[in-house]
Amino acid sequence: MYPVDVIDFQDMFPTEQACYEYLHLVKWPDGFSCPYCRQTAYWKMKDFSIRCTTCKKTLSVTAGTVFQDRHIPLRRIFQAIWYVVCQKQGVSALGLQRILGVGNYETAWSWLHKLRTAMVRPGREVLSGTVEVDETLVGGTQPGKRGRGAEGRELVFIAVEDKGNEGLGRIRLKHITDASGRSLVSAVKETVAPESTIRTDGWKGYSRITTNGYHHVIINHHEDVPGEDPTPLTHRIASLLKRWLLGTHQGGQQFSHLHYYLDEFVFRFNRRNSRSRGLLFYRLVQQALHIEPVPRIALKAAVA
Ligand SMILES: [Zn+2]
């Protein structure tokens, strides 16, 4: 169902036809079923669409997905997806431009945006169990003041599942405007299932957690114990995130795109133990088939 390495990848997708057949397989894993008449027999058309032999309606597997209306061969897009899942440090639009073989940076950037959008699983899963949360500032060089953020820096909310001896579970990140109680409680509600246990430091912004259906464990910082860290898991994620932003996005200075970077980081982190790059490839293709095409106007606004 998915390639295990680069040789396998090349063998699986030598032609446009092979790529389309793979999309059919991902879209209809139990076999084709016509959405109009539920019959399963079809013809393969020359333009890679398929036609129901009963009701004669024509369907395109790419219609209504990010693969729609593209001017780049599907093979190139598949190579780009393979490249995206294989790069440990993430990818830049320039790297993608080379793979896609396009002359235009804006086209490469828009594809990177589409793939990042596909990385966010539709109906994002929420975290549960014991979840440690905290915020961190990214970007800029000036130290920031909690609660208000700082000039040129952006505040990121971090939630990490604590799996005890098994270590870190899944994470969720969210760009927030400030560390007020209102912002933090709304970030918790968006990322963590009710009834979960939320562990925080003593910051007053988290004081209303319990009235919102969560258990709250507060770890106070003791000034007299040097090196003690009340929220070590979130701090580990914060330092990984900062290093990744520096390495991949040169510090991520385009903060208008911060939420895409955060989505990409979460996707990679939550699948860090996936045995196979091929499984990631399959998941990304599968998710890309569920993402609606991004309107050009929205893309232009995002690039600008
Ligand atoms: Zn039909």
Image: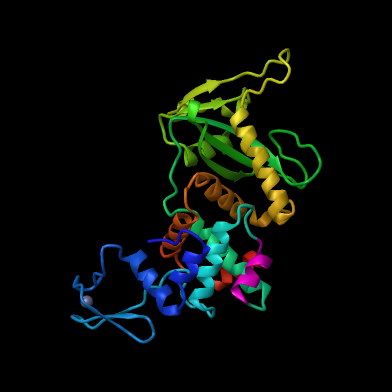
Magenta segment main secondary structure: helix
The magenta stretch spans which residues?
92-101
Q: Is residue 304 left or right of residue 42?
A: right
- The answer to whether any part of residue 97 appears in the image is yes
Q: Is residue 162 above or below residue 101?
A: above
Q: Is residue 133 left or right of residue 144?
A: left
Q: Is residue 285 magenta?
A: no
Q: Nearer the viewer, residue 146 or 121?
A: 121
The residue positioned 41% from the left and 33% from the top of the image is 194
Q: Is residue 264 above or below residue 71?
A: above
The residue positioned 42% from the left and 36% from the top of the image is 193
Q: Is residue 210 above or below residue 299?
A: above
Q: Position of residue 43 (x, y in %)?
A: 26, 82
The residue positioned 48% from the left and 30% from the top of the image is 166
Q: Position of residue 277 (x, y in %)?
A: 50, 55
- The answer to whether any part of residue 180 appears in the image is no
Q: Nearer the viewer, residue 150 or 288?
A: 288
Q: Is residue 95 magenta?
A: yes
